[in-house]
Image (cartoon, grey):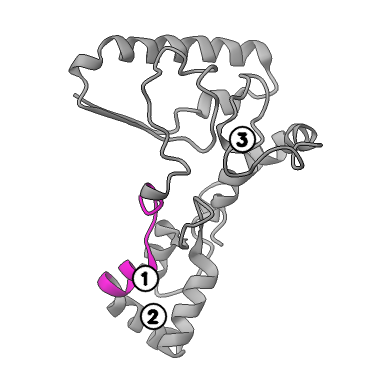
Amino acid sequence: MVILVDEYDKPLLQAIGNLELQEAYRSILKAFYGVLKSMDGYIRLAFLTGVTKFGKVSVFSDLNNLMDLSMDNRYVEICGITEKEIHAYLDDEVKELADTQMTTYEETCLKLKQRYDGYHFTAKSEGIYNPFSLLNTFAKMEFGDYWFETGDEEFLREVWPMVKKNLEGAAACVDPETGLFSAPSTASTPPRTIPYPSSTKADT
């Protein structure tokens, strides 16, 4: 059996600020993942995605055999398109886009990089292009804020005051590559890492 879970954290994020509702969601999710753990003999693999990171003590305390790939150099290319892949598989589209926009090939490559090369999952990561925006640009032969237009930032606006308060005094004492991203978060408090994944909503 293969299990795919997209946006595992959506219920928790929607309930931030409502401690009672978030605790109810957390209990349901915790029980669900606990059942998965009990059936691991039948599971070939499981892949979970989310936009932020709630500590294992919050949801996954029973499912304790997960490998977190979020900031792992081995998997930095998993969620986007590299520049090498663009030139290997999409070079004709780049040339067509340059002709349509009446710019040079080099200018078009630079503009693509400036607009869509926005993912950096580790300090050593090369820039990863936003696939949704990149493919829409090639389909329409026009630059646009395609990924940003797929949703709004209402959630980020709502939680930012809480995140900002949580950040006060933290920058000086937390290593951004280790402590910040690996420290467990409580179920009711927006993780300090929310601004990082939320920023990838933008096209740049």
Q: Kindly identify the amino acid type of the residue bearing the numbered disc 2.
A: Leu
- Identify the residue at horizontal 47%, vertical 63% (top origin): 127
Circle 2 residues within 10 Å: few <14, some 14–19, many ≥20: many
Q: Kindly identify the amino acid type of the residue bearing the numbered disc 3.
A: Gly
Measured in 3D between alpha carbons, the distance from the residue under mark 3 to the one under mark 1, in whole angstroms, is 39 Å
Residue closest to the eye, 177 or 22: 177
Q: Which mark is residue 171?
A: none
Q: Which element type, helix, strand or loop, lies under badge 2? A: helix
Q: Seen in the image, is 84 located left or right of residue 17?
A: left
Q: In terms of image quadrants, where is residue 62?
A: top left
Residue 152 visible in the displayed image: no
Magenta segment boundaries in residue numbering: 75-89
Q: Which residue is mark 2?
A: 97
Which comes sooner in the sequence, label 3 or label 1?
1
Q: Which residue is mark 1?
A: 138
Residue closest to the eye, 158 or 76: 76
